[in-house]
Structure formats: C-alpha cells, structure tokens
Amino acid sequence: MAPRPIRPPFAHPAFSLGAALLASSLAQAQGLSDPPLARPIDRRFTYVEESLHGALPGRFELEQWATWKHDTEADSSFDRIDFKTEIEYGISEGVHFAVDLVEWHWVDSATEERTKYDMSAAELKWRLSDPRHDAVGFAYKTELGLGPRMLEWENVLIVDKIVDRWEIAYNLMLGAGWEGEKTFEFEESEGELRQSLGASYEFQPTLFVGAELFYEKPLPDWEWEGRENFFLGPNLAVRGHEWALTTTALFLGSGGDDEPAFQLRVIFEVDF
C-alpha cells in the first residue's frame, strides 16, 4: 500500500492563528518594562503534570486549555478542538484543589460536525516532596469528572526533579471511564494507562524550551489488547507578571487509525 500523503500541520489556518498568538505573547514578554515575576509554580509542560505547579496558598488561578487534533489515518479532513476552563485554589504550599468548570469540544470530520459539552470535574493534588531541594519531587493527583453521558476517574503519580536550569518530569496515570447511551446511565466500562515524560530548559526566567513524550494504552473492557499510541514533540513556556502561556506540539509516532497525526495544546493561566 502506498504511504498516505501527510499534509503539513503548518498549512492549516488554525496553526497559523496559533503561531501568531504565540508570537504576540513572546513579544509582550520581551517588551515588559518591569522585570517579570519568575515563579516556580508556573508550568513548563502541557501533557506532563509537575509537582510544583499550582496556585499560591490562599490565591486562585484561572486556566484556559485548548487542544487541537488534526488528520487521522482514517480521515485526513479530521479536526477537533477540546476546550477546558479550570479554576485552581492553593489550600497550602503543597495542596491544591481545582474545578474544571466546563469541558467541551468542537469536531469537524467526514462523518460529523458538532459542538458538544462533555463534562465538569474536580481534582485534588498533594505534593509529598520538593524537586528543588529533595532528592526527587513526588506528588499525587486524583480527578473525578462527570457529564451527561460519561463518568471518569483519573489517578496520577508525578515524579520530577529540577537541577540548575533543567527540569525532568514523569507521570504515570491510570484512568477508569464509564459511558452510556442514556443520560446518567453508565453501562460501558473501560480503562486507560498513560505515561508521559518531559524535559525543559530555562533560557531565562521568562522563557523555557523543551520536549514531551506521551504514551497511552486504551483498555477496552479492561483487557490488555489492541493499539498503543506514541506522541512526541517540542514545547515552549512563556512567563509574565501574574500570567503564563505554555504550548506543546505533538506528532504521532505510531498508533491507531483514529489517532491524530498532529495535535497542538495551549494553556493560558492567570493568577488572581
């Protein structure tokens, strides 16, 4: 079989728009007259959780997520954008609580075009050790999401370390999901195993560049069968005074026919 032609993701109008927004954010970061506040709580990754990231104690953080997925083996015209709005509160230095106010998506493919609300969720994260001062950083996060047609529960082990200007972070996630055809009647059950690894280098207190590796193993009916998906790509984090923007572009190394050949995630966060 002849190889499927791959359309470069940068040829898509949405990619051009994302690049323009990112360039604008970089220009603003470089043009600040006052030195920006470099806070170790700001994230460096989008697919990898970090033990330090979170709102300051007694303060809130608003995060807006957008993940664009494009081009699958089964449908080269496939486009999907997932949105999430999250508010996080710092209970203490090492304990953070967050609420995903709304998670929804828009999809345009050969078979459908629609906008749909998916779920809302709540999460709690504990940091057990500090990656800056201890031998290694450890944290645990649990998240429960509920929507009209789905129920999800995720548990994440976070391991990371900061050495000089480098940060290395690893996640192991086990999730369980239930779906149903009728509202709040969940019948089908499945699991998912995910692992992610990230490395990031601090060029200056406002600019971080790195890469992320993402692996996922769907477990339909909790059986260890079927495909495994691998993604790899670069990331960029920009920090300002009371705000931060992080983005990652992932390319499919191997995976199922319905997996996107390219995906771009952008997270914008504001502290208040």
Image (cartoon, rainbow, N blue to C red):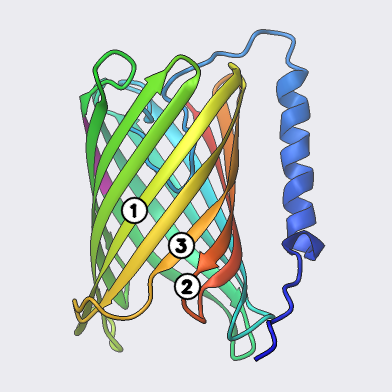
- Contact, CB < 8 Å: mark 2 with mark 3? yes
Q: Residues within 10 Å of mark 2 (few under 14, many from 20)?
A: some
Q: Residue at x 34, y 53 (%)?
A: 195
Q: Which residue is mark 2?
A: 255
Check disc 3 and report the residue beneath it. Answer: 230
Q: Looking at the image, which is closer to me, 128 or 257? A: 257
Task: Identify the secondary structure beneath mark 2.
Answer: loop
Instruction: Tell me residue 129's x, y (percent).
Output: 21, 23
Q: Residue furthest top?
A: 34
Distance (Cα) linking label 2 and label 1:
15 Å
How packed mark 1 is, by other alpha carbons closer than 10 Å (few <14, some 14-19, many 20 or more), is some
Residue located 55% across and 64% down the image: 252
At label 3, the amino acid type is Phe
Q: Residue at x 58, y 41 (%)?
A: 235
| Mark found first going from the N terminus, 2 or 3 | 3
Q: CA distance from mark 2 to mark 3?
A: 6 Å
* Image location (x, y in percent) of residue 246: 57, 38
Of residue 223 and residue 110, the one placed in the foreground of this image is 223
Say above or below: 101 vs 236: below
Q: Are marks 2 and 1 in contact (CB under 8 Å)?
A: no
Q: What residue would you read off at disc 1? A: 195
Q: Please report whichever mark, 3 or 1, sits nearer to the chain's N-terminal start.
A: 1
Q: Give the extent of the magenta segment.
A: 123-127
Against 16, residue 109 (above or below) is: below
Magenta part, dominant SS: strand
